[in-house]
Image (cartoon, grey):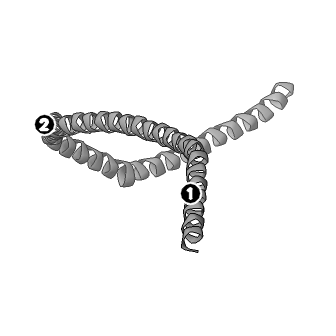
């Protein structure tokens, strides 16, 4: 009997453990069914679409690369035939405009100097001529007054 006392709880524990593994296997089976239905319902169509997209890309990719290469070649030709000469012309025009601007600046500076020199010389000559001219006018006024006085004196 004592041997039976420890065998009964062991049997119950083994039955419980067996029930646990059976329910675990059942739950795993249900989970696997759910995963299989998700894979069949969603992943497989996605993989088919991905395969179709990859096939389409592989089919259209060489043409796209060819078009891109033609576009790049056309852009290089345009750059060589149109843009570079235009850029060169713009650079030459800019250089000429800068040279002309420098020449104009020099000319303006020279005209300014000439104008300043002219004004200072005119002031000098005005100052130098004003005194003798005033003296000449005074002398003339004196000669005229003397001549008028002489004429009046003779007429009397």
Q: Quadrant of residue 69?
A: top left
**Label ID, residue 81:** 2
Nearer to the camera, 152 or 61:
152
Q: How many marks?
A: 2
Judge whether 38 appears above or below 153 on screen. above
Residue located 70% across and 34% down the image: 14
Badge 2 vs badge 1, beta-carbon distance below 8 Å? no
Query: Residue at the right extreme?
Result: 2
Q: Is residue 10 left or right of residue 43?
A: right
Which residue is more in the foreground, 152 or 146? 152
> What residue is drawn where x is 21% and y is 43%?
57
Which residue has dot 1 on it? 143
Mark 1 surroundings: few (<14), some (14-19) or many (≥20) residues within 10 A: few
Q: Is residue 122 left or right of residue 94?
A: right
Provide the secondary structure element on which disc 2 rests: helix
Front-lying residue, 102 or 124? 124
| Quadrant of res 93 | top left
Mark found first going from the N terminus, 2 or 1:
2
Question: In the depicted view, which residue is nearer to us: 69 or 32?
Answer: 69
From this view, report whether residue 53 is shown above or below residue 13: below
Q: CA distance from mark 2 to mark 1?
A: 88 Å
Which mark, by number, is residue 40?
none
Among all residues in the image, which is located at the extreme bottom?
Answer: 156
Residue 74 is left or right of residue 140, and the answer is left
Q: Residue 67: where, in percent of width, then height? A: 14, 42
At x 33% / y 37%, what residue is drawn? Answer: 100
Q: Assign the C terminus to one quadrant of the image.
A: bottom right
Residue 12 place in picture, x, y as percent: 75, 38
In what quadrant of the picture does the N terminus appear?
top right
Q: Residue at x 53, y 42 (%)?
A: 125
The spot of residue 21 in percent (x, y) is 62, 38
């Amino acid at each position: 009997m004592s041997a039976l006392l420890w065998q009964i709880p062991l049997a119950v524990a083994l039955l419980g453990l067996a029930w646990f593994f059976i329910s675990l296997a059942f739950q795993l089976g249900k989970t696997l069914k759910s995963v299989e239905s998700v894979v069949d319902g969603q992943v497989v169509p996605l993989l088919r679409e991905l395969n179709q997209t990859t096939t389409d890309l592989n089919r259209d990719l060489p043409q796209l690369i060819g078009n891109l290469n033609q576009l790049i070649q056309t852009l290089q030709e345009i750059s060589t035939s149109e843009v570079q000469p235009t850029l060169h012309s713009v650079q030459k025009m800019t250089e000429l405009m800068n040279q002309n601007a420098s020449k104009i600046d020099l000319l303006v500076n020279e005209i300014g100097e000439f104008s300043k020199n002219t004004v200072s010389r005119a002031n000098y000559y005005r100052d130098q001529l004003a005194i003798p001219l005033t003296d000449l006018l005074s002398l003339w006024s004196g000669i005229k007054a003397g001549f008028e006085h002489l004429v009046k004196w003779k007429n009397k």
